[in-house]
Image: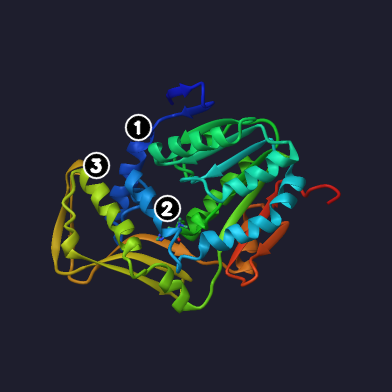
């Protein structure tokens, strides 16, 4: 682990830099590209350009997720602050950290907040949002962690009352087994006065789901294609954009959006840094991410299996999105 830099003035510390996580990512990429259904792990989506494109997605009219989550937070943030009385707010997969500001505001108003710990895979994005948060909330310190929430929970600072937020339905990018592993790891990480705040997108009308990932402007396609560009440049790979057609469709059996490409024709892609050739048949899929959609009962059951109990489940008025508040120990007297 390395301490990349300390920026005293902005009170932003970057614990651990991007470098440290690369071997594990390459290993995971190797495995995914050799799996039955070929996949490029979604972490490849979130380099600096990808994070910027995701920002753009959040402004698309059809991409309702962040707006619905914001709607819930505007109603519930004060309650969340009152119940958790958190002194440390952690955000996993923080990105540019927009909706989390609603939680920061409420905790700041409640007067308990001392520290914000955003964790994200993109170092430039993390640095920018950490600086912006430090400037906007002069009373708190910001300790940013460049990392992968599936691997780096042990890097989270301890002490105080911690609220660990995982917003935007990012948990939907994980397969059920990975989700179970993460929830179990979070349950183990929580101290008695800590809590989790999870944002999850809900199962809904297929047309609306598919529209959210197939915008006319092609921003989502550009975002997903950027994973190929990122892999080409960092792994010295030969993914040819013209040989892959973008596809995002609802998988009713798994209740997830299946997002990626289909090969236009049979061909091979050489991945120099991994030392492998990946061969595609005509029409063969290359998945880049899944985006699981949830139902309350199933989610609560999964949480329970990990030893977590959902104390509050809040949705927006339309029932599109949900926020789950999960204390390690039930909040006393509220
Ligand atoms: C950030 C993972 C929640 O799954 O909706 C948006 C990513 N992909 N458009 C999602 C995404 C295509 C997004 N998450």
Q: Find disc 3 in the rendering and name its residue.
A: 234
Residue 272, percent from left and from top: 17, 44
Residue 77 appears anywhere in the view:
yes
| In-image side of 169 versus 233 (left or right) | right
Instruction: Say which of marks 2 and 3 sits in front.
Output: 2
Q: Could you tell me how many numbered marks the image carries? A: 3
- Whole-angstrom CA distance, mark 2 to mark 3, is 22 Å
Label 1: which secondary element? helix
Residue 71, percent from left and from top: 62, 61
The disc label shown at residue 55, or none: 2
How crowded is the residue under tag 2: few (<14 C-alpha within 10 Å), some, or many (20+)? some
Q: Camera-side residue: 123 or 311?
A: 123
Above or below, 315 relative to 330: below
Q: Which residue lies furthest to the right in this view?
A: 333
How crowded is the residue under tag 3: few (<14 C-alpha within 10 Å), some, or many (20+)? few
Q: Earlier in the sequence, mark 3 or mark 1?
A: 1
Above or below, 212 relative to 70: below
- Whole-angstrom CA distance, mark 3 to mark 1, is 12 Å
Residue 252 appears anywhere in the view:
no
Q: Find disc 1 in the rendering and name its residue.
A: 19
- Occupied quadrant, residue 296: bottom right
Q: Earlier in the sequence, mark 1 or mark 2?
A: 1
- Whole-angstrom CA distance, mark 1 to mark 2, is 24 Å
Residue 181, percent from left and from top: 53, 50
Label 2: which secondary element? helix
Residue at 83 percent of width and 51 percent of height:
334
Label 3: which secondary element? helix
How crowded is the residue under tag 1: few (<14 C-alpha within 10 Å), some, or many (20+)? few
Q: Which colour scheme is used?
A: rainbow
Residue at 45 percent of width and 69 percent of height:
62
Q: Which of marks 2 and 3 is nearer the N terminus?
A: 2
| In-image side of 14 versus 331 (left or right) | left
């Amino acid at each position: 682990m390395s301490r990349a830099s300390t920026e005293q003035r902005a009170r932003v510390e970057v614990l651990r830099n991007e470098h440290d996580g690369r071997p594990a990512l390459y290993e995971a990429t190797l495995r995914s590209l050799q799996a039955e259904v070929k996949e490029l792990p979604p972490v490849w989506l979130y380099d600096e350009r990808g994070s910027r494109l995701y920002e753009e997605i959040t402004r698309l009219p059809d991409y309702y997720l962040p707006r619905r989550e914001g709607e819930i937070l505007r109603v519930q943030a004060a309650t969340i602050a009152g119940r958790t009385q958190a002194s440390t707010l952690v955000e996993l997969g923080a990105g540019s950290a927009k909706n989390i500001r609603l939680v920061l505001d409420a905790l700041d108003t409640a007067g308990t907040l001392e520290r914000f710990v955003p964790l994200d895979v993109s170092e430039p994005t993390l640095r920018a949002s950490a600086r912006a948060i430090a400037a906007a909330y002069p009373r708190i310190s910001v300790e940013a962690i460049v990392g992968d929430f599936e691997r780096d929970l042990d890097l989270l600072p301890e002490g105080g009352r911690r609220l660990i937020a995982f917003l935007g339905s990012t948990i939907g990018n994980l397969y059920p087994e990975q989700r179970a592993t993460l929830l179990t790891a979070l349950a183990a990480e929580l101290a008695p006065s800590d809590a989790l705040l999870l944002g999850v997108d809900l199962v809904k009308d297929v047309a609306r789901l598919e529209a959210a990932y197939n915008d006319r402007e092609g921003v989502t396609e550009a975002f997903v294609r950027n994973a190929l560009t990122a892999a080409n440049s960092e792994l010295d790979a030969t993914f040819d954009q013209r040989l892959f057609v973008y596809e995002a469709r609802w998988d009713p059996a798994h209740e997830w959006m299946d997002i990626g490409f289909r090969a236009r024709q049979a061909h091979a892609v050489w991945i120099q840094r991994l030392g492998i050739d990946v061969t595609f048949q005509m029409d063969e899929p290359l998945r880049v991410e899944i985006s699981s959609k949830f139902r309350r009962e199933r989610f609560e059951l999964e949480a329970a299996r990990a030893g977590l109990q959902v104390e509050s489940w809040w949705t927006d008025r339309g029932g599109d999105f949900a926020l789950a508040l999960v204390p390690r120990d039930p909040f006393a007297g509220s």
